[in-house]
Amino acid sequence: MFKRFKRSEHERVEELLSAYIDGELSIEEATLVEKHLRLCSACTHDLETLRQTVNLVRQLPVVSLPRSLTISHLVVPERPRAWGYVYLRGATALAAFLLIVLLAGDLGFQYLWAPRMAAPAPEPMALETTIEAPEATVQALETTVEAPEAEIGVPGEAPPAIEQMEAQKVEETPASLTKATPPAEGLGAALPSLQPTPTPELVAAAESPLPSPVPEGVAYAAERPERFLAFLPALRLLEGALFGAFLILGGATALLAWRRMVSQ
Amino acid sequence: MEEAVLIAAARQGDTQAFDQLVRLYQSAIYNVAYRILGDEEAASDASQDAFLSAYKAIGKFRGGSFKGWLLRIATNTCYDQLRRKKRQPTTSLEALYLDTAPPWAEDEEPEEYALRQELGRTIQRGLSTLPPEQRIVLVLSDIQDLSYQEIAEVMGTSLGTVKSRLSRGRASLRDYLLAQGELLPPQYRLKVEDRT
């Protein structure tokens, strides 16, 4: 127990010797060290060699400077921030960017989008089906338009069906044979019942003024380039204005940059 | 001109005023860098970098010891350089052996001069064996003669840390010098025969 305490004190004093040399110990620590040193020759030796080491280091001479360490020749004097130049440069870049975007959009539309819209090339199968349908409608319409004419025929000439009916009427009512009913009247009465009942499809086809041979979807898409074309002059004007602005701003920026470079 | 006036002028971007501050402290800063790095070229580069950093950061100087503030920047610069060197160990200890020792007092006898030169080299090699933190504390204490409190402020550590680093650093250097005993001039040899 005693030995362990002594060893611990020895280690502690060893650690305190450096600060003891510098007089940086508290009174209690200094007292402990001095008391221990009277008994421990190893610590006395350590203190002595440590002191010699410190003295040797302290004797190291001052090293002369190989060169001056002044900094004025290394420091580039800070120029006041030229905000005008910064804004001008930004505006030039913005004008250039907008011009590029507009031109790219314009050219892209003219050479890539518009031709495709104007002459659509859908798949062959789809084209057949879409084109056949209106033809059928037109044919159907023609029949409906022709039908009344055929049925009305030349006035005075009763159609065969009417003649038959009239014949039946004559047979049924022989008394009325004397009163020859003019065929036109009979036709007029019979017409409504004889008019063919139009199917809903035919009605729809007849109502549409002029069925377009171009499918509906294609027609809608084809309108878009035309709409765009309406804006084309304004777009060209804007492009021209932007180009002008870019030239003026770019020139001013280049001039300022050159002046800054010269003044440096 | 007074230091405070020079600092105020330097804050306004007056490089000439800052140069006057550099002239006041360049020797101290260079000597610290030289003892920490052990190489003339590296020390002058590190010192120059430290002064340049100080000039750029002078707006952040909040009063107190200007020398202490400069030493803090310089030791940090040296510490960074040592860490870089550790990552890229291209410089061998041989470089330290080839270092030309700093010139000594001109009125010295040639023999005495040679002996002290040898001692200087041995101590410098001993310093270079220490970990950077211990080396910096030892240089600030025994070469720059800073108090423990000043060292703690320069290094941004506690007094206890300074004490323990200095104690271990000195003990390691002592052991190194004892081991090099035969190489040292007799009058500079540490007395090992007293040990019983």
Image: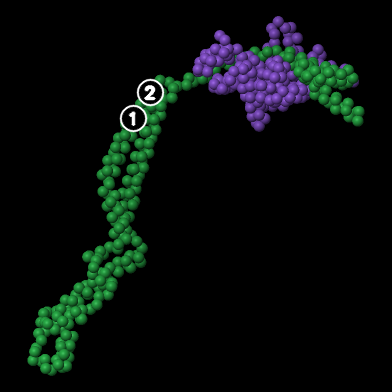
Quarter of the rendering occupied by the N terminus of chain B? top right
Task: Identify residue for label 1.
Answer: A251
Q: Quadrant of residue B18?
A: top right
* Mark 1 belongs to chain: A
* Residue A200, percent from left and from top: 28, 73
Task: Identify residue for label 2.
Answer: A259
Q: Which chain is purple?
A: B
Q: CA distance from mark 1 to mark 2?
A: 12 Å
Give, as a three-letter code, the residue at label 1.
Gly
| Nearer-the-camera pick, A48 or B91 | A48
The residue that appears at 50% across and 17% down in the rendered structure is B12
Colour that chain A carries in the picture = green
Per the rendering, the mark at residue A205 is none
Q: Is residue B59 above or below residue A113?
A: above
* Mark 2 belongs to chain: A
Quarter of the rendering occupied by the C terminus of chain B? top right
